[in-house]
Amino acid sequence: MAGETTSDQSGHDFGAAADEDALRRSARDTEVGAAQLRRRAGRRASQMRAAAARRMDSAASVMHERTDRAAEAVHRAADSLSKGADYVRANEMRQIAGDAMSVIRNNPVPALIGAVTLGFVLGRMVSRN
């Protein structure tokens, strides 16, 4: 029966030995289970780290791409301003006005949009002061 001890003629307690063996097996099983849990947790942590690193790399790539595009646009705008400055330095006001009129005649819709935009920007600047 459970919990009962049996002794032989030498006085050896077989029930206590069986309980000790059961405790040892239980402890060993617990250690094995804990080791398995540690390995699974380690694998899961590695998977999560790898996934996080992939997402970070992806975000960095997108940021580089968008920054590169923005930098290219800023460089183009700076180049255009520089060419415009060269044009203004090299030409008289009469020539500049004549060229502007030609551009407006040849491109009326973009010229109108530009004029409205310029008016809006100037209006905002004046209204803030």
Image (cartoon, grey):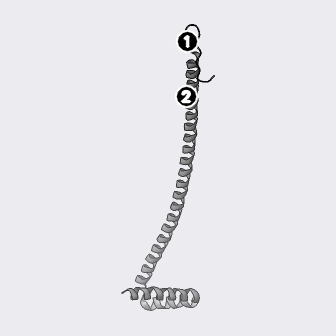
Q: Residues within 10 Å of mark 2 (few under 14, many from 20)?
A: few
**Foreground: 37 or 83?**
37
Q: In the current view of this chain or complex, which residue is farthest to the top?
A: 9
Above or below — where is 42 with respect to 107? above
Q: Where is residue 107? Give x, y as percent.
A: 58, 87
Tell me the SS state at disc 2: helix
Q: Where is residue 42? Give x, y as percent.
A: 54, 40
- Answer with mark 1 or mark 2, whichever residue precedes in sequence: 1
Which residue position is annotated with label 2? 27
Residue drawn 49% across and 64% down?
67
Report the quarter where the C terminus lies.
bottom left
**Foreground: 60 or 111?**
60
Above or below — where is 48 with respect to 26? below
Report the quarter where the N terminus lies.
top right
**Foreground: 29 or 118?**
29
Per the model, the C-alpha gap separating discs 1 and 2 is: 24 Å
| Disc assigned to residue 12 | 1
Q: Where is residue 96? Give x, y as percent.
A: 46, 88
Tell me the SS state at disc 1: loop
**Foreground: 8 or 41?**
8
**Quarter of the image holding residue 89?**
bottom left
**Disc 1 to disc 2: CB gap under 8 Å:** no
Which residue type does callout 1 highlight? His
Q: In the current view of this chain or complex, which residue is farthest to the left?
A: 129
Residue drawn 38% across and 86% down?
128
Residue drawn 58% across and 7% down?
9
Which residue type does callout 2 highlight? Ala
Q: Where is residue 73? Give x, y as percent.
A: 50, 71
